[in-house]
Amino acid sequence: MRNVSTFFSGVLLFLCSLPLLAANTLPAKLDWKTNLDAPVWADPAAAKGGTFTDFVLVFPPTLRNVGPDSNSAFRSYINANQMGLTSIHPNTHEIIPELATHWAYDPDGKTVYYKLDPKAKWSDGEPVTADDFLYTIEFMRSPHINAPWYNNYYTEQVLDVKKYDAHTISVTGAVARPKDELHYYYGLNPTPKHFYGQLNEDFTKQYNWEIIPNTGPYQISKIKKGKYVDFSRKKDWWAKDNKYNVGRFNVDKVRVKVIRDANIAYKHFEKGELDSFDLVQPDFWHNKAKGDIYDKGLVEKFLFYNDMPRSASGFFLNTANPILADQQVRIALAHALNFQRVIETVLRNDYERLEAFHTGYGEYSNAKLSARPYDLKQANALLDKAGWQQRGGDGIRMKDGQRLSLELTYGHKEHNDRWSILKQDAIKAGIEINLKLLDPSAHYKTIMQKQHEISALGWSTGFRPAFWEHFHSENANKPQTNNITNTASPEMDTLIMAYRNETDVNKRIGMAQQLAQIIHDQGAFIPSFKVTYTRGAHWRWLKFPATPGTRSSGSLYSPFGDGGLFWIDNKTKVDTMKARKGSAQYPVVSTTYDQFKTSSK
Amino acid sequence: MIKSIALNPQSRRRLARFKTLKRGYYSAIAVIFFIVASLFAELWINNRALIVSYEGQWYFPTYGDVIPGSEFGLDYQWETHYRKLQKQFADEGSDNWVLMPIIPFSPFENDFIEGEYPPYAPSVDSGHYLGTDMAGRDIFARIVYGFRIAILFSLFLLAVSYIVGVMIGALMGYVGGTFDLVFQRLIEILSNVPMLYVIMIVASIITPNFWTLAIMLAAFGWMGMTWYMRTETYRENAREYVLAARALGASDSRIMFKHILPNSVSILVTFFPFSVVGGITALTSLDYLGFGLPAPTPSWGELLQQGTDNMEYQWIAISAVTALSIVLTLVTFVGEAIREAFDPKKYTYYE
């Protein structure tokens, strides 16, 4: 009898301890780090309140952050309000806490442990827990989201997420990396499991216009399709008192209006309906930013030099096209495009020539590369060698009855003049370039379907050069990938995978530079311009800290992300709107900030 | 000149009456002059020389193939820069000479002045009498070549819409019955499609060229003529001469082409000028919005867009607006005069 009861109690005890055994255990002696010592970049005295009105040229094709058509410019508004585990300080590039309060590194070099902030909450009030991170893996690997890049990344690059308790997780990546890069490559965002639940094939359609719960300072509060999207500041945002958030995200509401033409948008700005306006385009800065409102000091101008990776902007040649499949033709085309003339004339020398695909990445950029200059001798010599010696009656080269005629698709009518100049000068090399202006979303769709011949485009940047999405053969010749040149080179593939998996910093740098050289040699990307600053104008009721931006500021007027530094002074606004009709004179402000100016390539 | 064409007495009377309407008559002469001038635009506005005399040989580059620079002893293979060649020959003092058109610029050429940013104001020194646009292209050239494109577009559009409209309208009136009913309903439905929107949607997905754009506009424009032709045909069909022809055994097609159409179509002439105005306006509007012909085609709409986007450079907008106003006003005068010439009454009061 006693033996049986002992036996059963033993079994019971064993069964009760099973859950504890099943839970993961943290390794002993983890060195938990945090970083509350980095400098703040906002003004803690910033006043809260007001509505900031911004504009976009096209209404977003979807509010999803993954899946078809989600890769549009509007997604940056949505992503900026989804916090990550940690963040990279915009000026010093240190790791600073966000959703995680502490982090620790595993000796294996590819796993990071995170302690989640117990205060963290979704916009619908639910707490952010470890389960949301586990769900991210499930979500990103699901075929229902129709996002092959994410499927691949969260299978091959981010290998595993483990839960230790409700607020402790670890993320394991594919290869060991330098410690700060671990956060960049393997740091995940949580995905609200309670919102998505079970995914099915209807994901794309079902979540097209759904407001996904987020963890950032603003959430979409109102959508008028085709007209505007309103973001409202969360009154009790869980992170509002965190050290790096004090003095940021000050306006109560951000209204993102749709204004289909930038010239018309500028007129809205002149009337005070938009609070600020980016004036990077030369004709805007020189021709439009003048007049009473500037002379009376009602509108102020800032020019702010920044130091960040430059957008890979230029002409992307579809190597699947029979004419462009010939590398000599591609190089000849590069020598036949007179970008310098465009810079010196219609761009008023405000822009510079971009030299390579990955520019501004510090040591990871290959400083030896230079863009091919306008050289008709070279262009003509190469084309003669490539079999295009014969010239038709109109001066355009021919080969086997086919004319050397290419189509350039682009999405902005402001670029008409730039490409017209290139077209005229290319005729001297015997190349005919037909300009094809499309609506921006139609243009993007064409590119994603790989139906273009030459396309003018600029990619946004990341922390480190990315090669796989743009140049690996796995993404070539299929739709909805970012390999829009259809580059498929076995030599490059090996090197790209080696770069992706390399642990040693110096070896990675070497590979990045080697890849940059190969990209240059292949010539499927012809770089166009880079801008090493941001500049714009704003009404004087928009107030800024002493340094109005950061090293990584792409625009001084970004209400989200690393920005959100400005605030609206309501009294100034009332006075200024009244002063528009009067004769009051305020100090004229036109300031240049060059603390982050760089001359490196 | 006109006497050599055999006109029936009615037409002769109308022509005589037209000639007495001085405003319309002189406008017509002016418009015809403009059209002819623009058709031969390459002879007086062009960056290609009219005649080049080089080492005893004569060259006429205007309408022919590209003549590479190497032909004239220059060291490049692409098209000769004739203005520079002219200057070079003058500097050399040789027997070679170049005769350039009066305005030596092409509408596509980006002519930049060292050290200055475009657009350049009108000046006699630079040769740009109306200045240049934002990309350094001569405005006078863009206006003349743009006029040519607009007028040819308009005439082609007119021809297609009228031929289709007249045919279908006449058939509707002649055959009558169910055919007429069905087509009437069809035309009503098609007339309700918002033309400009559809064209804008199509143009933002594919970039139209001259012909596809004209066909698209014609596809929406043919319906206007059918109403008029239908009523005219119905009326003529009931007349006695048609009855007589039928009694004599004339076939349907003979009645249509020999009796009905000549009597109805002559009055269509009164609609021509207003359709031309409509065609020019349609093309200009589409180009202004960016949904018309692709860059860098010279176009009044595109010039207007540049002008309104850059009001501080007034010469761009002023040139485009003035050209449009003049041409459209003249064509309207012609239209009014034709209408009055065709009016059976000597005095008409419009209410």
Image (tube, coloured by chain):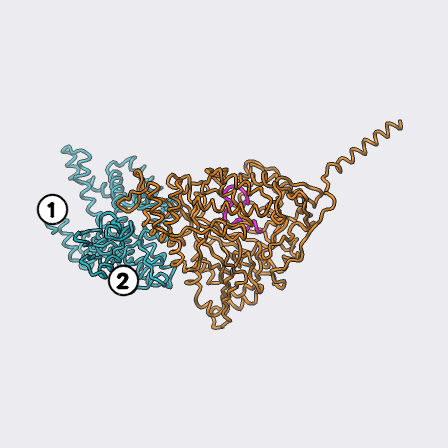
Chain colours: A orange, B cyan
Which amino acid is tagged 2?
Gly
Q: Which residues are magenta?
A: A64-80
Crowding near the residue tagged with mark 1, few <14, some 14–19, many ≥20 C-alpha atoms within 10 Å? few
Crowding near the residue tagged with mark 2, few <14, some 14–19, many ≥20 C-alpha atoms within 10 Å? some
User: What residue do we see at 57% from left, 62% from top?
Assistant: A567
With A319 as the anchor, is A507 left or right in this view? right
- Kind of element beneath mark 1: loop
Q: Report the predominant secondary structure element of the magenta stretch.
A: loop
Q: Nearer the viewer, residue B210 or A208?
A: B210
Residue B31 shows in this picture: no
Residue A249 shows in this picture: yes
With A224 as the anchor, is B77 left or right in this view? left
- Kind of element beneath mark 2: loop
Question: In this view, which residue lies farthest toward the right?
Answer: A2
Give the image location of residue B201, x and y in percent: 40, 46
Residue A46 is drawn in which quadrant? bottom right
Q: Cα distance, mark 2 to mark 1?
A: 47 Å
> Up-down: is A599 above or below A17?
below
Q: Which mark is residue B127?
A: 2
Give the image location of residue B146, x and y in percent: 29, 53
With A73 as the anchor, is B314 left or right in this view? left
Closer mark to the observer between disc 2 and disc 1: 2
Q: Quadrant of the N terminus of chain A?
A: top right
Which amino acid is tagged 1?
Ala
Residue B314 is drawn in which quadrant? bottom left
Q: Are marks 2 and 1 in contact (CB under 8 Å)?
A: no
Residue A172 is one of the magenta-drawn residues: no
Residue under circle 1? Answer: B6
Residue A38 is drawn in which quadrant? bottom right
Give the image location of residue B296, x and y in percent: 33, 51
Q: Disc 1: which chain?
A: B
